[in-house]
Image (cartoon, rainbow, N blue to C red):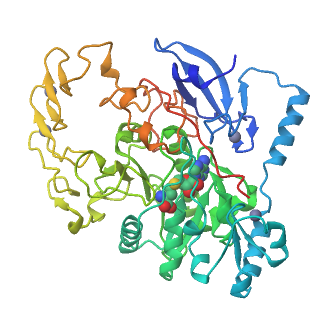
Amino acid sequence: MEISEANMDSFGIEVILPEEGKTAPRCPHGPTLLFEKVDNGGSKGRRFYACSACRDRKDCSFFQWEDEKVSKARMLAREAEMLSKRPRFTQQECCSRFVQFASLPFIEKKFCEDCQILLLPAEHSAHSAHRTTAVTAAQLRRPSILLRPLDNKKSNAQYLFTDRSAHFLLDTLVGLGYKKVLCVGTPRLQELIKLRNLEPMKSLLLDIDFRYAQFYSQDEFCHYNMFNHHFFGGEASRAVLDAFLTEADGEQVVMVADPPFGGLVKPLANSFSLISQTWKKLRNSGDSNIDIPIIWIFPYFFEPRILECLPALTMLDYQVDYDNHPLYKHGKTGRRQSPVRLFTNILPKQVVLPREEGYRFCSMCQRYVCSLNKHCTKCNLCPSKDGREWKHCSACGKCVKPSWSHCTSCGRCALPDHPCRQGDGGNGCFSCGSLEHQRKACPLRDMRRKNSLGPKAKSLGKKASPYLAKPGAKKKSGVANRAKKRAANAL
Ligand code: SAH
Ligand code: ZN
Ligand code: ZN
Ligand code: ZN
Ligand code: ZN
């Protein structure tokens, strides 16, 4: 049977993280992930392997049942497909091209918008029918502006930080004394670090969008898949990460990740844990309970799921916003505020949120919060997640959204027009797992960033790091929306 979008939506899909010694088949995006369908009654379906990075089978059609025997012919076809998906240039070639390009006179510096590549003079004629632009030295330092953001509406759109958010992040990291920033899916942050030339600050970008290899040296960019911790450049590329994670003379490292939204929290958490483990090993000193400092940027409604995987993280109130996101801009009141937050293991009180943007310090919570987020003495915390002022419900024994009221038949607070006692609405959104809405109203439907198979690994691999949750924690799993277009083969 084929897994179509339609029947994927009617089942929950669980991701099963790889167990030691078990190798998953590979697609052009590295080792595939093992999924298991679970129906509403909780019974398990047949397991299958599918691409870790692409939900849309148009982007990566890999599919294999766990117990399936694969014919020789199909293996060969797969090999051929992998070869055909390889980037046009190797990373090494990209680097020497960049050096050549940088030394060209302005008149010969051209970028092909159709092919998304920097052109060398000998290539101009081959691209003469394409749209090309001149490239200034300043533009060459701002690849996130030069490159067209991947904007596949229903899939892997790239959302770039506004200057406000990017500068806030960088100022915070500088203020905390970090000297190395591991940028996981944050090309604009890496760009800003280089632009501001904050000696001796260093950065390394890990991203699946290979177009960025054209602008950075081999120790500044690794072609990487954060859903399976795969390095497309193999051992040499891993070695680049290892060297970066090695802290000499108090060069503290911090990691900032802004993954595509839409789920797959479990594999992301697993990859981040693996990065932390590498960092620990290289430190080889002191406390093995300490993890690499991390900032994971993700929507607030994923909080329960992220904390389930990485209990050491805390969600901060800061609202991250994006230049090219149509819906989420900072500062507007009501529903259009950005739902994207920072999840971090850095001590919350050390992350100073700007007063002029409406944040204040709560001395009881020992963290900076949105000024409308009023401390509740009954809950003993600042309860708001969405930037609006929440109110305490004594029947529920907790604070709830201002628009909710207590429903005696459901025995909980809900929107006044909620489907009263229908089904077990208490299980919330089948797509993202939130208890606050049903799937039809899921904000992820609008976000249209990377989507994913829903979450919830049922079994965690033996390699689970200390900051992964205990196995067995299990909630209803869900399937997210539609698919993605990916960047890997842009060159
Ligand atoms: N706000 C960030 C960009 C976030 S968009 C900034 O301004 O720098 C998500 C980023 O993750 C993109 O750069 C995208 O190329 C990258 N990405 C998407 N899927 C990925 C994957 N599977 N592995 C690694 N990076 C990925
Ligand atoms: Zn794939
Ligand atoms: Zn071209
Ligand atoms: Zn309260
Ligand atoms: Zn209530």
**Residue found at x 27% / y 45%:** 335
Picture quarter with ligand 3: bottom right
Where residue 257 sits: x, y (%)?
49, 55
Left or right: residue 272 compared with residue 111: left
Q: 217 or 191, which is in the foreground? A: 191
Left or right: residue 362 compared with residue 5: left
**Residue found at x 74% / y 20%:** 67
Above or below — where is 389 with respect to 169?
Answer: above
Q: 24 or 322, which is in the foreground? A: 322
Q: 397 or 122, which is in the foreground? A: 122
The quarter in which the C terminus is drawn is: bottom right
Left or right: residue 235 compared with residue 173: right
Where residue 155 sits: x, y (%)?
56, 42
Where residue 124 sits: x, y (%)?
80, 73
**Residue found at x 61% / y 83%:** 137
When asked about the image quadrant of residue 330, the answer is bottom left
Where residue 340 sits: x, y (%)?
37, 50
When asked about the image quadrant of residue 400, the answer is top left
